[in-house]
Structure formats: C-alpha cells, structure tokens
Amino acid sequence: MEIHELTAKETAKAIKDKKFSAVEAVRSSMARISKYDGVVNALITVLEEDALRRAGEIDALIARGEDPGPLAGVPYIVKDNFCTRGVRTTCSSHILENWKPTYNASPVNYMNAAGAILMAKSNLDEFAMGSSTENSIIGPTKNPRDLGRVPGGSSGGSAAAVASGYVPLALGTDTGGSVRQPAAFCGIQGIKPSYGEVSRYGIIAYCSALDQVSPLARSVEDLALAMEILARPDPNDTTCDGYARPKFSDATAMKDLKGCRIGVFAGFEASEMDSDLYGALTRAGDICREAGAVIEPIDLPIAVKYGVATYYVTALADASSKLGCYDGIRYGTHIEGATLADMYANTRTSSFSEEVRRRIILGACLLTEGFYQNYYGPALKVRTKMAEEFEDVFSKYDAYLLPTTPSLPYPLGTKETDPNRMYLGDVFTVPISLGGLPGLSLSMGFNSANLPLSVQIVGSRYGDSKVLGIAAALERLIGRPTVCDPRKLGEVA
Ligand code: GLN
C-alpha cells in the first residue's frame, strides 16, 4: 500500500515504527494535492512549508525516542471556518477573505498536540450555509468520485480531500448535516458527535445552538481516534460538556451486534427517495440482523415531517444574530459610505453572497414581533416534541438506522439556484441535529453506476460510543472505503 492509502492510525504507527518519516508523509500528501487539486478545488489555503517544518520536528522527537502522540506525523485538513493563528481564515466569504485570526480553534490545538500536521484549509459553502460546496469565493469543489457532481456540503472540501487521498483525516463542522452529507456523497465515513462533546471555541459560528466539530475519515477506527482527541471539556466553551468521556476506540472493538436493539427507519416509501439508497438502508438492517442484532421498523413522524422547517427557522434566526458582528469595523472587509448606515449597507451587501444575505434577512424577519410568535416560538415547541419522539425511540432501541440523504450526489449547478430543493435534501440529517444526537454516515459501497451509497447510524445523546461500535461492526462486514483517483464517471482511472 502507498502512504496516501493508509488510515490515520496506520500512518501514525508506520511513522513511529520508522517505516517512513513524517516528512515523507507530508510529501506524499503534497504530491496528491499538487496532482489533483487543480481539478477538485477542495482547498483554499495549502500550508506546505509549515507542514514540512512541523514534520521535521516530529521526526526529531521520534529520533530522540520521544512519543509525539497518537497522531504522530499524520497530515490533516480543517475546513476554512476553523480559526488558525496567523493563517487566513475565510469562511469562503469576501467579508473575511483577508482575515487572519490571532489564535487557534481548540480542536486545532488538540490535533496539533496529538502530533497531527495541518496541511491545508478546505473549501466550504460560505459560512457553512449550504449542502453542495458550490457557494464559495474560490468556486465549487468537485466530487472526486465523479468530477461532474457536487461533493455535498458544506464541508465538501474536507470530504473530497479525504476521498482523494490528500489526507486520511479531516475536520469539518456539522450544523444540520454538513459532515454527514458530504461524507455520504464522497463515499467515506463521517460522524457528527452529540452536541456538547467537542469544543466550538474558535469555530466561526453559523448557528451556535447546533454547530458541532465533526471528523471525516476512511475508517470508523479513525473517527473514534479523532473523537478521543477532540472530545474533552473546554473552559472556553460553556456548551462543551464537562463529563468524563469514554475511551471511544474501545467501542470499535465490538465484534458482533448480539444484544443490540436497532430500529430501521420505515417512515418513507421506496418511491419517495432514491431507490438505491433505500436499498442500502434495507441492506444495512439485514447485515445488523445477521450480526446478531434485533431489528425492528421505526417511524419518526414528527422529526421527518417537521424537521426541515423547524431547522431552517431556528438556524436562520441564530445565524442572523451571529453574523451581525460583520459590520465592516470589527472584522474583515470594509467598504466606505457617505454615512455609517451606508457603510454597513455597502460592506454587507457586496461582501455576503445572495444565499447568506437571504438567510440573514429571513432570520432577522423571524425574530420580529408577529413572526416570532407565529414561527420562531412554534419551532421551539416542535423541537421539544421532536426530542420527546427521540426519547421514546431510545427507551426501546440502542440506535437506529436512517438514510443520510434522500438522493445520490447530483450534477454540479443543478440545485444552487433553487434553495428550497437544496434545503429538502437535509430531511434526514437536520432532525438529528435538533435532537443534539450523534449521527454517523457510513459508506455502503457503490450502486451500479458507481455512485456512493450510505446509511446513517443514530444514537442517543452522548451515546457516541455505541454508534461508533455499531458502525465498526458494520464496516468490518461491508469493507472500508478506499482512496480514489479523482475522475469523471465512466472515465478509466
Ligand atoms: N445544509 C444545511 C444548511 O444549509 C446544513 C449546513 C451545515 O450543517 N453547516 O444549513
């Protein structure tokens, strides 16, 4: 196997065993980036020099017999909404296009302290608002499994980078599906942890009540390893829970699913979604049953029927107040005007894209007298009802299976101009976010046209270990995703 095909765990072990050096791992990562990123367009900033310098330090530690940590020398990538000290952090927006934070996001510090090496910052939909990574100052990222299609979003750059073998591990953020859906579209694994597992300190907010840092990888074991490094209390983020986390890697040793009770979503007809994805859900249920689990159909009537509406009302209201800080004074781009109000208007009108402006305006509107009572208030009530529905499910089951997405990755440019169609694609991911639950998108191989299939495994709040355990047991039976050489579907690699 070549270096770029290894998982993060295998890479760290090989570097510690001196099979190859951290510098060689970084060179291998750079070679993939140089070869493919001109076409895939997954990265906004590449940190070659910094990465090589850091790799040299890791190699020196190993030569002295010291342990650089569980991710010794493993190249990784973060989405460009993670603050990185002295390194441009754009959020894919003109408003921050030249902004350099003075500090690192906590998750970046944790990864670095574990020996991982930051290679690059990846593309996203502006301010993490979107599902296709098309709405960006650097233009769309392409799906490496078929360059004519979207990679999903908003963490599409991180997902495409992992699928293309730039790095074995990348971080994104998932508010309503932004890691699970691109993982599904790019044929890899991704987990949104329970809300409160991982610190959001230094993550540029879209909707603080739902945003969660989420890893992407080509194996469930790597997701567990990343969780072990990322999930810990942080005094800088009061929503990051203080509880003592379990050892997530232990969960992935689960050999079979005996004694597990798993619900399989049966609230949709096959005709209401892509038939191959429906088939993948059924197959995942069958595999769980063969592995010893008790499988039963479940319905989630409130979550599925009202999830999208509830999510967009609450998320947009939150976003409109979060994005108020971009006033042309404190941060980023500043465009003059005759009066202060003109300056605000000039700066914000020309620096935010149409989609971000739409969300700010809708969100502000939802918080005004009348709209608040008719929409925002009821949305909060529906969220409570949804939580009750989830509680009821978890009183009977350890986990449940749900599709990650209702559709396969679609051709570039087909939904960008139709926000409603784009939003409806989030039907299976947003309810999980509203419940604060952990959700893992697992690769289920490919359909006959070679497009990636997936299933979502959902657990109870802070039941992340169980989700990882079930995912690892399934992955052993299905096989873990491999790296692809980016290409157009039908073209021979
Ligand atoms: N697609 C959803 C949205 O546009 C989710 C985005 C996300 O999780 N950051 O809001």
Image (tube, rainbow, N blue to C red):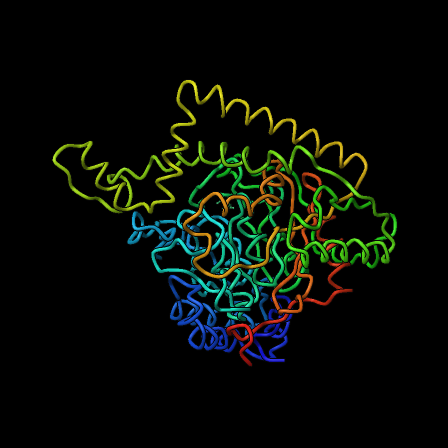
**Which quadrant is home to the N terminus?**
bottom right
Residue 126, percent from left and from top? 39, 49
In this rendering, position of residue 459 left or right of residue 60: right
From this view, report whether residue 467 is shown above or below residue 30: above
Residue shown at 54% from the left, 44% from the top:
424
Residue 255, percent from left and from top? 82, 59
Residue shown at 43% from the left, 68% from the top:
51
Residue shown at 54% from the left, 47% from the top:
174
Judging depth in this view, the residue of 401 and 91 nearest the camera is 401
Residue 148, percent from left and from top? 48, 67
In this rendering, position of residue 492 left or right of residue 360: right
The residue furthest left is 338
Q: Quadrant of residue 280?
A: bottom right
Judging depth in this view, the residue of 242 and 320 nearest the camera is 320
From this view, report whether residue 2 is shown above or below residue 239: below
**Which quadrant is home to the C terminus?**
bottom right
Q: Is residue 419 visible in this depiction of the protein?
A: yes
Judging depth in this view, the residue of 394 and 264 nearest the camera is 264
Residue 189, percent from left and from top? 63, 59
The residue furthest front is 271
Q: Quadrant of residue 88?
A: bottom left
